Amino acid sequence: MLNTEPNIAAPDDFYEALLSIHQDLTPEQSRVVDARLILLLCNHIGDLGVLRQAMVRARQGIEPAGRDAAIAASA
Amino acid sequence: MHVDYQSLRFEYRRSPDQSASQRAHHPVVVVGAGPVGLATAIDLAQSGQRVLLLDDDHCLSSGSRAICFAKRTLEIFDRLGCGDPMVEKGVTWNLGRIFHRNEPVYSFDLLPEGGHRRPAFVNLQQYYVEGFLLDRARALPGIEIRWGNKVSGVSPSEDGVELTVETPEGEYHIQADYVVAADGARSPIRKALGLESRGRSFRDRFLIADVRMKADFPAERWFWFDPPFHPNESVLLHRQPDGVWRIDFQLGWDADPVAERTPERVIPRLRALLGADAEFELEWVSVYTFSCLRMERFRHGRVIFAGDAAHGVSPFGARGANSGVQDAENIAWKLALVLRGEAPDTLLDSYDAERVAAADENILNSTRSTDFITPKNAASRAFRDATLDLARDCAFARRLVNSGRLSLPCTYHDSPLNTPDAETFAGPLVPGAPAPDAPLVVDGRPDWLLRRLGGEFSLLHFRKAAPAMPETVPPVRLVTVAPGEDAEGMAARRYDARPGTTYLIRPDQHVCARWRRFDPDAVSRALGRATGRA
Ligand SMILES: Cc1cc2nc3c(=O)[nH]c(=O)nc-3n(C[C@H](O)[C@H](O)[C@H](O)COP(=O)(O)OP(=O)(O)OC[C@H]3O[C@@H](n4cnc5c(N)ncnc54)[C@H](O)[C@@H]3O)c2cc1C
């Protein structure tokens, strides 16, 4: 079960640390850092059920406005 | 003896069917002499079935095309009587290395455990594979091959299929009980029946350059992401027999497919990788895009689709030809039983169920590899690069790097032909899985378990004394493994066998039932189920 109750002992310290890793970065650099961070955390959690719940929550309410580079094909 | 299979030409010859006053009848016609059609025809002929094989062309595969043939496919070739030349000619490899930019990030050994007759993969040009299959097909009495015979019309009915065949001397018609359409990705038979193969294409282009050169790269698969000699894109290097190397350059969607094929473009790309003074000759060059797609169903009455005609995958993971050969062996024994009247026509529905599931598994794996290699949006790209960065010092990330997964045979978990276990068995082997190989010692000489199974239903029994096997239709061959024969204990481990353990194994060497002791009634029931009679 994904825990959405408070779980971090020092929330302000955590938040400050999270922002500080992005200091002076371009959006592209931040994306790199975020991607690494997500992968590290996901591996640490490990439980795919929990990860899927977090993914669903993260994606909630966002209507796709972009387009992937794959095309329907038939032969 | 060296045969240049690529340059062989096969002549069209007039067949008596073309002047027959009555339409000639054939129990089974296989359309397409690619790897899948050839394997199907051989398998059918080996079980005593007369087969007609039609091909519109006069030669084998032009260009090396498929080069990686997996362990299970080699085991099938063993059963088809042509495994040895494939493995002797092929380049055996087990090791893959992955580089990011200039640095090695990860390497993998595909066959970490011993006790298998065949290696994880051999690399062998498709024209050799087709050539060795063809040599075998020609040595079998039941197969007639007609080159320059193009199927141009298909009319299925309740009790057969009428084919229109075009030849240099005009059209003729034949009647078939069953047709196996192994006529390739563009499948004219699929089109003629108004059917489609659907899925998705990836917006990317790849250059394949097969070059002949003297080089001291090892027999390993090397894959670079974003190397300095080809920035931003990926490159694959792989060795084939005869000093030929497969080099694959990712080009991106905007590349011009015609210009990229010209030596003026290809040679500088190769020099960037191989060095300015490398000496090489271009053997085959092609630019391609790819799709993952499949037909909704592979069986349409008496017309059965197999290989690329039924499904398509991206090349990463080498699942095209490998899975097609598995289609071939799945349909062949079923058709042979139905044609002999030993199983109902509905047995063929299980081909559809099993091979559609296999195609989905292959498409899933191939799509995942492609999504890693060809990121389809900015986030995919960011995660890909992050994975590669982390892979250098974080073991977990190495497991996420995906440049193509090993082509493994599908386990038919949900097959209607399986009898579910009534007793407990430990280990990965389950009903529906291909029977694993193991080394044996028979009469003091080394042998292999799969070699003893052959191509009929087999009852694999772990014990010294052989039980009496009842007469059944189709017959079941008894294969016993005495404890002394399993000298290393590998067979017992892989089958979780104790004295008395008994496996019923299908002609395609997939497990369909197993017990802790031999019970002739249980065997008969399981056989009924595995042949579609229950
Ligand atoms: C560049 C490239 C690399 C690849 N690499 C790999 C790899 O490493 N591993 C792997 O497993 N797969 C690989 N593949 C895929 C592999 O080549 C195919 O999956 C395989 O050839 C499919 O075999 P097939 O017998 O179904 O079809 P095909 O080989 O296409 O054979 C179809 C045959 O049918 C004949 N035919 C067509 N229409 C008619 C007609 N109307 N009448 C009579 N005959 C007809 C054709 O002449 C042909 O001989 C690769 C493919 C390409 C293009």
Image (cartoon, coloured by chain):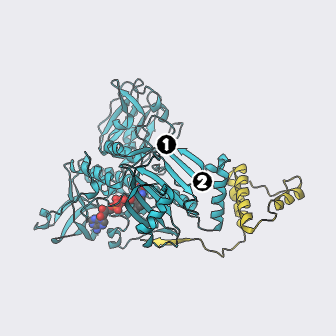
Residue at 34 percent of width and 23 percent of height: B444
Residue B421: x %, y % from top left: 49, 41
Give the crowd class for mark 2: few <14, some 14-19, many >=20 residues within 10 Å. few
- State whether residue B508 appears in this view: no
Q: Picture quarter containing residue B503?
A: top left
Q: Check the residue under mark 1 and report the chain it is in.
A: B
Amino acid at circle 1 = Val
In front of the other: B457 or B98: B98
Give the camera-side residue of B218 and B180.
Answer: B218
Residue B515 appears in view: yes
Mark 2 and mark 1 in contact (Cβ < 8 Å)?
A: no
Q: Position of residue B510 (x, y in %)?
A: 41, 45
In the image, taking residue B17 as reference, residue B419 lies left or right, namely right
Work out whether residue B58 or residue B99 is closer to the camera in this orientation and state it: B99
**Chain letter for the cyan part:** B
Q: Which residue is mark 1?
A: B430
- Furthest-bottom residue in this view: A65
Among the chains pictured, the one given yellow colouring is A
Q: Secondary structure at mark 2?
A: loop
Residue at image position (53%, 38%) is: B427
The image's mark for residue B102 is 2
Residue behind label 1 places its C-beta within 8 angstroms of ligand 1: no
* Callout 1 secondary element: loop
Q: Which quarter of the frame holds ligand 1?
A: bottom left
Tell me the tag on residue B233: none
Q: Which amino acid, mark 2?
A: Asn
In the picture provided, is B396 more to the left or to the right than B143? Answer: right
Measured in 3D between alpha carbons, the distance from the residue under mark 1 to the one under mark 2, in whole angstroms, is 43 Å
**Residue B164 picture quarter:** bottom left
